[in-house]
Image: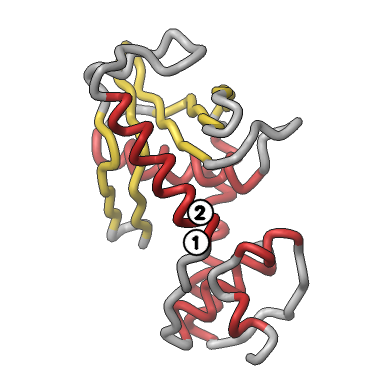
Amino acid sequence: LYSSAASDVYKRQVLGLRERETDLMREGKEMQQVEDSRDQRRKWLPGRGIETKSARHGKLYVSRELGLVGVVDVIAEKGEVAVIERKAARRPRRVHRNHVYQLAAYALLVEEATGRPVRRGYVHYLKSNDVVEVTITEEAKRHVLWIIQQIRRIIWEERLPPYVEKPACKSCGYRWICKQI
């Protein structure tokens, strides 16, 4: 489990802290709302032949068995089921691994809810309006299950992971408390 994610779990689940909303988070919510309203008139995901007309937007999925909860931005069902995650960012050179694992986690939730396999996901980078296809492998799903076990261990043992400064720390809603713990 990555140190910043583990630290967030500790702060939220063990200490009961709430993450402060940052300017980047607000910007992302606004971009998401604009995109959701566009979806009302759109028939296709930009840049791809994925029909979004019958897609479900912002649906909450809960799995007691996995101990996992997620709000999937878009689920498209045209032949096969695909999960779509929107990011208020420009397309990176490579899809970040945390985006791949987020899609894999959503795939596990949707599979449990629908009984249908999810083998494909998409990341829609809103600032560049690029859509990147991601193959969701069984290995990625197993890794998500491992991460869930690590999260449970952090909560059970109430052990603070070591602090490691990362570029993402600048926009983190826990930055105000992180170095104080």
Q: Are marks 1 and 2 in contact (CB under 8 Å)?
A: yes
Taking 46 as reference, is 170 left or right? Answer: right
Which residue does the image show at 43% across and 8% down from the upper left? 49
Kind of residue indicated by mark 1 = Ile
- Where residue 134 appears, as percent x and y from the top left, is 57, 27
Taking 53 as reference, is 24 left or right? Answer: right
Q: Quadrant of the N terminus?
A: bottom right
Which residue does the image show at 56% across and 59% down from the upper left? 147
Secondary structure under the numbered disc 2 in the rendered image: helix
Give the image's coloring scheme.
secondary structure
Q: Nearer the viewer, residue 17 or 38?
A: 38
Rendered position, 154 above or below 57:
below
Residue wearing tag 2? 145
- Where residue 36 appears, as percent x and y from the top left, is 31, 33
Q: Which mark is residue 148?
A: 1
Task: Please give the count of numbered marks on the rendered protein.
Answer: 2
Characterize the local packing of mark 2: few (<14), some (14-19) or many (20 or more) Cα atoms within 10 angstroms: some
Q: Quadrant of residue 170?
A: bottom right
Taking 115 as reference, is 153 left or right? Answer: right
Q: Nearer the viewer, residue 138 or 151?
A: 151
State the separation of the CA atoms marked 1 and 2: 5 Å
- Where residue 133 appears, as percent x and y from the top left, is 56, 22
Taking 90 as reference, is 19 left or right? Answer: left
Which residue does the image show at 51% across and 13% down from the upper left? 47
Characterize the local packing of mark 1: few (<14), some (14-19) or many (20 or more) Cα atoms within 10 angstroms: some
Q: Which mark is residue 156?
A: none
Rendered position, 148 above or below 132:
below
Kind of residue indicated by mark 2 = Leu
Which residue does the image show at 69% across and 85% down from the upper left? 179
Q: Quadrant of the C terminus?
A: bottom right
Q: Quadrant of residue 53?
A: top left
Secondary structure under the numbered disc 1 in the rendered image: helix
